[in-house]
Amino acid sequence: MSTPVLSVRDLVVEIPTRRGVLRPVDRISWDIAAGEILGVVGESGAGKSMTGNAVIGLLDPPARITGGEILLSGQRIDDLPRDRLRTLRGNKMGMIFQDPLTSLNPLLTIGDQLTETILEHLDVSQSEAHKRAIAALEEVGIPAAKQRIGSYPFEFSGGMRQRVVIALALCAEPDLVIADEPTTALDVSVQAQIVALLKRLCRDRGVAVMLVTHDMGVIAEAADRVAVMYAGRLAEIGPVRDVLTTPRHPYTEGLMASTPLASQGRARLRQIPGSMPRLEALPDGCAFHSRCAYAQDKCRRAPGPDIASCDGHAACWFPLTQSRPLKEAEA
Amino acid sequence: MSALISVRNLTRVFDVSKPWLNRVIERLPRSLLTAVSDVSFDVEDRSVYALVGESGSGKSTIGKIVVGLVSPSDGTVEVRGVDLSNSEDAAEIAAVRADIQMIFQDPFASLNPRWRVRDIIEEPVKVLGGDTSGLAERLLEQVGLSATDVGKFPHEFSGGQRQRICIARALASEPKVIVCDEPTSALDVSVQAQVLNLMSDLREQYGLTYLFISHDLTVVQHMADVIGVLYLGRLVEEAPRAALFDTPKHPYTQMLFEAAPRMDAFGRDIDVPKGEIPDAINPPPGCAFHPRCPFAVERCRVERPEMRKLGQTRVACHLAE
Amino acid sequence: MSDIETEIHASGLSSAPQSRLRRAWDSDFLYSFRRSPVAVVAALTVTLMVLAALFAPLIAPYNPFDPATLNLMNGFTPPMTENEFTGQIFLLGTDDQGRDVFSTILYGLRISLFVGFAAVCLAMAIGVTVGLLAGYLGGWTETVIMRAADVQLTFPAILVAMLIFGIAKGITPPEYRNEVAIWVLILAIGLSDWVQFARVVRGATLVEKNREYVQAARLIGRRPGAIMLRHILPNVLNPVLVIATISLALAIIAEATLSFLGVGAPPTQPSLGTLIRIGQGFLFSGEWWILLFPALTLLTLALSVNLLGDWLRDALNPRLK
């Protein structure tokens, strides 16, 4: 088995506040192979964006990595000095943010932004960089790329801007791309286009993608594997078809069941009682136990289960399996 | 059943021209943005009518016109027989307006951060001079919060809880109609389920009518009785829920259904929609969708299609059948 | 943690409302205050000076403006030394007329602080009102107000103040001039300062105007005046507080400048500026204390108020949180 492009091992991010030390990311581990798309799904506050920022090294102080390792193609990057990390970023790692409007510098033409990135990371001449920039724009589907390379971001629509952002992330030929909610701010039809584009480009170039989103539908269509996060911890991880159709963690099961599609024909949606606990007020034991229909004594008392120590798929002392009937927990 | 809300030929045009001086110097024409163009539909009493569309479809503008925040450029909105824009009787209009409330999309911006929850909820009733004793506590319990929360400020609540407070505020003046502008779009999936269930329960309990605006087809499929699909300010299709989702007749509706992410479609490579939503200031001639429509013919380029009835569906397409 | 507490925490609801004092003490705002030594020292200094000014008649060892108590023979006594004629000791010495410098400073502080506060209050009242109207109503109201503001900004504030002062002097009969001087001073400084408040409030109003909570208030029928006063005003006050504090320092210095130039507080009710003017005449003849102590007082006051304003700006800045 070849080395995975990204390897995260027991990553911990902490933020010291006056009310105590918070852990927005608590022992996260996963691997992403070349050409694979890992979907990271979770609700707001689950820590998925923070994990993405930690990997690419853009954590806002006072948040900092206090445990675990991040390896890029087998090399540790979490302990690198800032300037080494900066050269890696953009070159080996690219990032796509949620809002295309603020991801692009409004004062520079898209051509300038592309050539700047290319020249920074690849050893090519100015004219070669310009050619590559046009090629990148054509590849993401910007019509009349040669004429439009001199345009400013505000002259593009939202969908087009996000394509430019993708081109920007990929132009320096990275091995890993982190996409943080790339389609959330876009219309449905544009979203479909962007997801298809992302899939095609990453497969063609063998890029590993960490796709962070809260939209399960996008995950179902785009991801190969999916990781479900809850209150900073990894709840479940596995191939997307398995996790979405036969979830093992009660949270994943509750999440899938509460989508409107799952309750077709019924008057009320299934809902998970309560809401995700705030980081300052995490309960003892399993973070989900207070909302879990299957919680038992061990869940309340034993320190939070680790995926590795459980069956390797779901961080749950009593994961749901085929033999256990799913309880109908109406709220 | 008579229609509670009757919208006829509703049109709204915004003047987005540059200032006069700029236009003179740069020799530019006026820019007019047609947000809503000749939209007509009825909402039955105690039903949920959903308006679905992407950005630029005009769905939010229609909601604001119904509620009275924006005035129409042309056309009428009749609620319980009263023409809200043209009626002479101001008292009658005010009485009807008091029966229409709104829930907004952003739970963080819909509540005044400096007001306590009690004052926020009581405000609609206070303005009408009603009795507010115990009102806020009662409504909070109804929406699933605790009566002890009345003295708190909005920032002490989560997004889902704030949306519940908005619902409580909307219920305070005992309205008949609630216009819901993307009420759950900013919420997480599990919170969305709670809020949608709450809205369904309240609707049954109080016999409310919802004008439900959304871009999320799965939510609309769950909540709505009748659905109207908007594209670039025009109503392109309207049908009862089952009819729309079983047999969508308009090519745009079909494209929307195809493009919407589905959770049972693992790794499918979909038929990607062509093109993008055109500019509302210079819409395409004829049918607004024709540049992106796989079935477009010459007539579509020239003549704007009218709404016609096909069974239970109304559709604005020359070729639909 | 008991099950109930876990449940409450899991559902995200905070605990029952604490007492207001406890909550205020715990808040991020006062926390950052407690942690910043500069802010604490500055606040203490200002408080001390305000108290000293308020209780001047009680603290001052002598009343410097009562001719009956004045003894010319006390004149020019250095600080803390026995006067060769009367044997009295004065903490900070005496001026040319035998007035105790410490007492004159205390009374002078009164005038300086009073004029400063009042002028800022006037500027705030005008500026905030005008800014709200300009931001909310837009159109010609906004254009007229903002252009008037622009025009006023082209004149230096001190010149505007002197202009107003001159006009007032011209129209007041001579016997009332001294009495009216303080009020004219307040008017002059206040009128020269309203523009920055108006600009900031207008900008903040433009932002808040489009928020959903304002739309919610509009749709329940609240009148524009009520919306501006009860909804928008509380939310635009943050930057106003910061500017007010810094304006206070500037107003105090402006008053001192005007008094120094002779167009401010009269010698019968001298402010710190007047005292500085008086003291300046004696600096080079050796009686340094008549100038130094009023000048130091003015410096400390202005500096403390400025530092307090600086801290306030950082504490209230949502981006830095």
Image (cartoon, coloured by chain):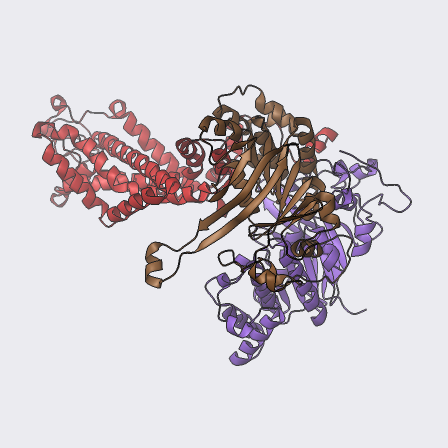
Chain colours: A purple, B brown, C red
Out of B242 and A285, give the one closest to the viewer: B242
Look at 58% across and 22% down and name the residue there: B135
Pick out the residue farthest to the right. A323
The answer, for residue B110, to whether it is visible in the render is no
Quarter holding the C terminus of chain A is top right
Return the x and y of residue B170 as percentages of the image width and height.
57, 31
Return the x and y of residue C137 as percentages of the image width and height.
37, 40
Q: Classify residue C265 by image quadrant.
A: top left
Figure label count: 0
Question: Residue A108 vs residue C140: left or right?
Answer: right
Quarter holding the N terminus of chain A is bottom right
Pick out the residue farthest to the left. C174
Out of C68 and C253, give the one closest to the viewer: C253
In the rendered view, tell whether residue B192 sits above or below residue A118.
Answer: above
Q: Classify residue C241 by image quadrant.
A: top left
Look at 55% across and 48% down and name the residue there: B58
In the rendered view, tell whether residue C85 sits above or below residue A108.
Answer: above
Question: Residue B316 vs residue C7: left or right?
Answer: left
Return the x and y of residue C140 as percentages of the image width and height.
32, 44
The answer, for residue A153, to whether it is visible in the render is yes
Out of B307 and A223, give the one closest to the viewer: B307
Question: Residue B144 vs residue A291: left or right?
Answer: left
Question: Residue C74 vs residue B168: left or right?
Answer: left
Out of A58 and A116, give the one closest to the viewer: A116
Q: Classify residue C203 by image quadrant.
A: top left
Return the x and y of residue A99 as percentages of the image width and height.
57, 56
